[in-house]
Image (cartoon, rainbow, N blue to C red):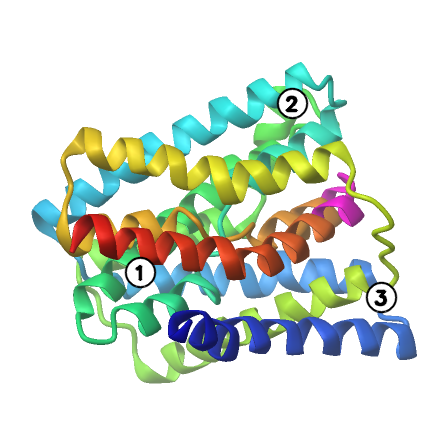
């Protein structure tokens, strides 16, 4: 109960405060959603991608264990979501958003605060979550972005559109500067950091604006499948992978918990930017975040029982 209270107070309530602010402001002032979308995609996302990669510190065996787990889990989720979308006969744009809603995880403004609450006595848990967040950035701006762009374009055209997105280059530039240990001057780093810090607030306000006129009168099949895939199938598959790789201790706990986080807000931003059922995408983000209060708490409790 204590963990549920802390997650609600320090994670869920701040998220929904910003979403609520975005919904209220959009209803009152009618935001230009096209401008908001471009602001997120071409200014804020490149900054947060670059800064996260540039500041990454984890090295060695722990990093290889984490990376092995994340690659296997992501592949399983891709296969699962692709198979479900084909079985359900979703059309291409709906399939794209559904796959992103299952594969892409909110490991930033949700995952980091949860890890701070759960692993406040053990910094390794939080460090692992930082690696998860960086991996999710890479997955988001490769698989997630290409998945969204390719709906209305041939594969070659989609690849060209993908290469025009600045987020990919920001990520590669961050990897390069990190690898060669080049220190960025303070007068350059300060605006990059400030822009990166603004991303969470603006992204959640944008999600709120997307959700301002949402009406969820019933749970559609794609929405139910998104919630099942993200909140139930993902941690179950993660547990199998953890046991297969024989991970234990804080590493196993942290990765198991990270697998249960709700759908990434970026999936709704991509859906808005490329016109792939943005209302459904916003619903998946909102409802997975609400239901995660119970599912994440259950996974945290289970992780402590199994891997302490």
Tell how many labels.
3
Whichever of labels 1 and 3 marks the residue nearer the N terminus, that label is 3
Q: Examine the structure image and report whether residue 111 is included in the region drawn in magenta.
A: no
Tell which of 86 and 191 is nearer to you. 86
Q: Position of residue 126 (x, y in %)?
A: 26, 65
Q: Is residue 222 visible?
A: yes
Q: Residues within 10 Å of mark 3 (few under 14, many from 20)?
A: few
Residue at the spot x=80%, y=58% of the render? Answer: 34
Quadrant where the N terminus is found in the figure: bottom left
Q: Residues within 10 Å of mark 1 (few under 14, many from 20)?
A: many
Q: Which residue is mark 2?
A: 85
Tell which of 81 and 139 is nearer to you. 81
Q: Position of residue 130 (x, y in %)?
A: 31, 60
Q: Which residue is mark 1?
A: 130
Whichever of labels 3 and 2 marks the residue nearer the N terminus, that label is 3
Residue at the spot x=17%, y=48% of the render? Answer: 63
Q: Which residue is mark 3?
A: 32
Whichever of labels 1 and 2 marks the residue nearer the N terminus, that label is 2
Q: Position of residue 270 (x, y in %)?
A: 66, 47
The magenta stretch is 274-281
Q: Quadrant of residue 240?
A: top left
Q: Is residue 298 left or right of residue 22?
A: left
Q: Is residue 191 left or right of residue 165?
A: left
Residue at the spot x=48%, y=28% of the render? Answer: 78
Kindly indicate whether the residue at mark 2 contacts the one at mark 3 (C-beta within 8 angstroms): no
Badge 1 element? helix
Above or below residue 308? Residue 43 is below
Residue at the spot x=65%, y=22% of the render? Answer: 85
Q: CA distance from mark 1 to mark 2?
A: 30 Å
Label 1 vs label 3, nearer the camera: 1
Tell which of 101 and 243 is nearer to you. 243
Quadrant where the C terminus is found in the figure: bottom left
């Amino acid at each position: 109960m204590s963990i549920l209270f802390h997650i609600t107070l320090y994670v869920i309530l701040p998220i929904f405060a910003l979403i609520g602010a975005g919904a209220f402001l959009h209803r009152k002032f009618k935001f230009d959603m096209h401008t908001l979308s471009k602001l997120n995609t071409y200014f804020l996302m490149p900054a947060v991608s670059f800064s996260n990669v540039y500041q990454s510190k984890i090295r060695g065996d722990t990093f290889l264990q984490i990376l092995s787990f994340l690659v296997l889990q992501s592949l399983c989720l891709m296969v699962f979501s692709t198979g479900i979308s084909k079985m359900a006969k979703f059309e291409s744009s709906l399939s794209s958003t559904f796959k992103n809603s299952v594969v892409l995880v909110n490991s930033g403004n949700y995952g980091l605060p949860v890890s701070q609450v759960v692993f406040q006595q053990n910094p390794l848990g939080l460090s692992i979550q930082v690696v998860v967040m960086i991996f999710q950035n890479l997955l988001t701006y490769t698989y997630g972005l290409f998945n969204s762009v390719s709906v209305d374009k041939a594969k070659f055209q989609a690849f060209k559109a993908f290469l025009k997105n600045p987020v990919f280059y920001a990520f590669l530039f961050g990897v390069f500067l990190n690898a060669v240990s080049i220190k960025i001057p303070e007068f350059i780093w300060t605006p990059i950091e400030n822009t990166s810090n603004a991303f969470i607030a603006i992204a959640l306000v944008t999600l709120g604006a997307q959700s301002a006129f949402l009406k969820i009168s019933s749970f559609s099949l794609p929405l139910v499948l998104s919630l099942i895939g993200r909140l139930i199938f993902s941690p179950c598959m993660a547990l199998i992978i953890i046991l297969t790789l024989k991970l234990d201790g804080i590493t196993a706990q942290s990765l198991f918990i990270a697998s249960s986080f709700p759908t990434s807000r970026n999936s709704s931003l991509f859906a808005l930017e490329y016109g792939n059922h943005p209302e459904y995408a916003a619903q998946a983000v909102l409802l997975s975040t609400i239901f995660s209060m119970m599912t994440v708490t259950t996974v945290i409790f289970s992780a402590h029982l199994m891997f302490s």
